[in-house]
Image (tube, grey):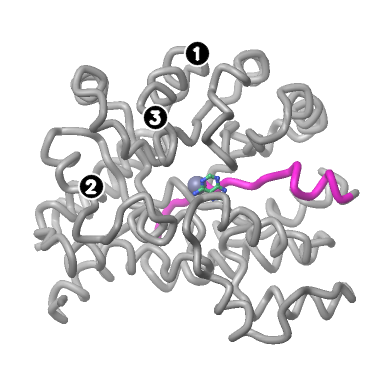
Amino acid sequence: MITSEMKHFIEHLPKVELHLHLEGSLEPELMLQLAERNRITIAYDGIEAIKAAYNFDSLQSFLDLYYQGSNTLQTEQDFFDLTWAYLLRSQAENVRHVEVFFDPQSHTDRGIPFGVVIAGIRAALLQGEQQLGISFRLIMCFLRHLSEQAALETLALAEEHLGWIDGVGLDSSELGNPPDKFVNVFARARELGLLTVAHAGEEGPAEYIADSINLLKVSRIDHGVRITDDAKLLDELVESRMPLTVCPLSNVKLCVFDSMSSHNILQLLEKGLCVTVNSDDPAYFGGYMNANYEALVSHLHASKAQLKQLALNSIEASWMLQAEKQLLIDEVRSLS
Ligand code: ADE
Ligand code: ZN
């Protein structure tokens, strides 16, 4: 249950999104439009059929569908439309700054040039900054079920677009694909001046969180909810303020937690971790930023003070300039 006052509070909270896969914001309506526009046959004959497939029992069961959806993206216009639709939704939810992921290998492996993908995304992000007032950073993810060599080749393709890329990340199937597989490509990315993040401790063990920090030198951990399995590491992350980009609706949809009422985000917050709220793949998981915040009120009884702290953590954990952060911090603090 959530009161209309709390809904209103969440709607007016200035929000920052740090864990969003652009391909995961592909709504069924746009997926069908793109399939038609690009003359691609997909396995579903309508919106309801696509939505009926959104019944996942693990990360892998989701990824299988997610990569099929990504196949409908072909032209620069498609990547523009995808990104623009996400930004419009973000503006409607009072999201002020976004740091978004894209998976170039899902596209280059199908013969779509890297330059086509990034040009469409970049044009929409720039238009979003100008017309919607949403600032942004862009993070290129490596697919961890593929080899490090493939990641290195992708990084080489990215080199001519480095001015448009702020960081690299690591996503896809976590179990069996540990951070140490990607030490060299992350070192090269850092040499090129890129920041680093990695999904860790979503389905995989807390050890992958430690290895991402120590071996990949990440400045944030994506998910990280399995941190509770290692009390000593948890204390270290409290001390270092290492951010965790937690995705509540995603975690329940992918059965990381049995239900929202058993999610650990508020426990982590109360222990002093820099946890943040994010939507991950909102088209597939049933909601964008406000729905994720609302779920914490409805199922975990989050207070206004906790919601404000979560929003402040996202500002702190972002890659915005300090002066930009301060404006948002002041705005969050002034809310009652
Ligand atoms: N790619 C898209 N969403 C993901 C998630 N939640 N975990 C790992 N890889 C992903
Ligand atoms: Zn993710």
Foreground pick, 132 / 279: 279
Instruction: Kindly identify the residue that appears in the image at 35 percent across and 46 percent down.
Output: 246
Question: Of the residues shown, which amino acid type is indicated by label 1?
Answer: Leu
Q: Residues within 10 Å of mark 1 (few under 14, many from 20)?
A: some
Q: Which of the marked residues, 3 or 2, is nearer the chain's N terminus?
A: 3
- Given the image, on which type of amino acid does mark 3 rest? Pro
Tell me residue 13's x, y (percent): 25, 62
Tell me, yes or no, whether the highlighted magenta stretch contains residue 38: no
C-alpha separation, residue under disc 1 versus residue under disc 3: 15 Å
In front of the other: 251 or 306? 251
Q: Which mark is residue 205?
A: 3
Instruction: Please state if 187 lies on the left or on the right of 264 as rendered.
Output: right
Label 2 residue SS: helix
User: What are the residue bounds of the magenta stretch?
Assistant: 95-110
Mark 2 or 1, nearer chain start: 1
**Above or below: residue 335 compared with residue 269:** below
Per the model, the C-alpha gap separating discs 2 and 1 is 26 Å
Q: Is residue 101 magenta?
A: yes
Q: Which residue is mark 1?
A: 215
Which residue does the image show at 75% across and 48% down from the upper left?
Answer: 106
> Counting residues from the N terminus, which is met first, the one under dot 1 or under dot 3?
3
Residue 265: mark in rendering: 2
In the image, residue 169 sits, relative to residue 100, either above or below, namely: above
- Residue 298, percent across and down? 18, 69
Q: Amino acid under label 2?
A: Ile
